[in-house]
Image (cartoon, grey):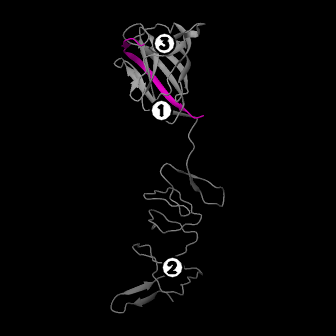
Amino acid sequence: MGNITLNGSTSGQITLAPTAVAGSNIITLPAATGTLLTTAGGQTISGTTTATNLTVTGTATLPSSTSLTTPTLATPNIISGLTLTGAAGTSGQVLTSAGSGSAPTWSTPSAGAMTLISTITTTGTQTSVSWTGLSGYDNYIIITKNLASYTGAGWLQLQFGNSGSYITSGYSGWPNGANSGYTGSASINLSASFSEGNQNAGGNGFFTITNMTAYPKIIGMYGVHAAGVYVSQGWVNSATANQIQLFYASSAGGTQLTLIGQASLYGISS
């Protein structure tokens, strides 16, 4: 027997045609009413269908109620919500493996010990580098790169602030490793007098800020091209602070000079 032809009840016909060399193969038809899928596509299957070792080439759209057991997805393009074991997760969560044989779960990634708040680059037009509205951390690190005064000799200085304004009195410190310090200053002095109108010859520094929520303090090192390394520390008699500014001035809290260079602020988890 070659082909089997089935006539439609009103018109047309369907022919079942094996290949020329058919071999000895068996096709088992299900004992149920339904629709056979063909390579022509366009068929719709409803209800519950179980497929083992199913390979899909191209694009397959699965309804939201689809349940997959141990699937292998080569290059998935997920364009809607992904639900795993009944959970969709929340914004910012990531998938975490539970090991072989177990479904992955949604989890919230832990914050790193050192998180970049922002990096500010100046080109000779700004008079300060500042960060406001700080929250979530009690300790910070400032890293400067080629930071220098652009319009005259001055000292690198720092002021803390709170609620939109900066504190301009009550600072104390020991500048540049000195054995004696100062009190009642308008700012904290972080370097000796220095001026370089060249971004490649500015100062590179590393400063640690602690206790932003209770009498903030700073200590650090600041290296200046062809002028040496300066170690300084300072603090202010203020209960709390949520903003910081760095600037160059020729006197404590004096007129700010324009800056050139870069400064980055990091929040420290501890």
Task: Name the residue rendered at 51%, 26% in the picture.
Answer: 239
Q: Residues within 10 Å of mark 2 (few under 14, many from 20)?
A: few
Q: Which residue is mark 1?
A: 117
Whether label 2 touches label 3, CB < 8 Å: no
Task: Say which element carries label 2.
Answer: loop
Task: Say which element carries label 3.
Answer: strand
Q: CA distance from mark 2 to mark 3?
A: 101 Å
Q: Say which amino acid is labelled 3.
A: Gly
The majority secondary structure of the magenta stretch comes to: strand
**For discs 1 and 2, the disc positioned in front in the rendered view:** 1
Mark 1 or mark 2: name the one nearer the start of the chain: 2
In the image as oriented, which residue stretches furthest toward the right? Answer: 100
Left or right placement of residue 167 versus residue 214 in this view: left
Q: Say which amino acid is labelled 2.
A: Ala
Q: Which residue is mark 3?
A: 184
In the image as oriented, which residue stretches furthest toward the bottom? Answer: 9
**Which span of residues is magenta-colored?**
253-270
Count every numbered label the image shows and give the total. 3
Q: Quadrant of residue 257?
A: top left
Task: Name the residue rendered at 58%, 7% in the picture.
Answer: 178
Q: CA distance from mark 1 to mark 2?
A: 71 Å
Q: Which residue is mark 2?
A: 20
* Nearest the eye: 239 or 57: 239
Percent position (x, y) of residue 50? 55, 75
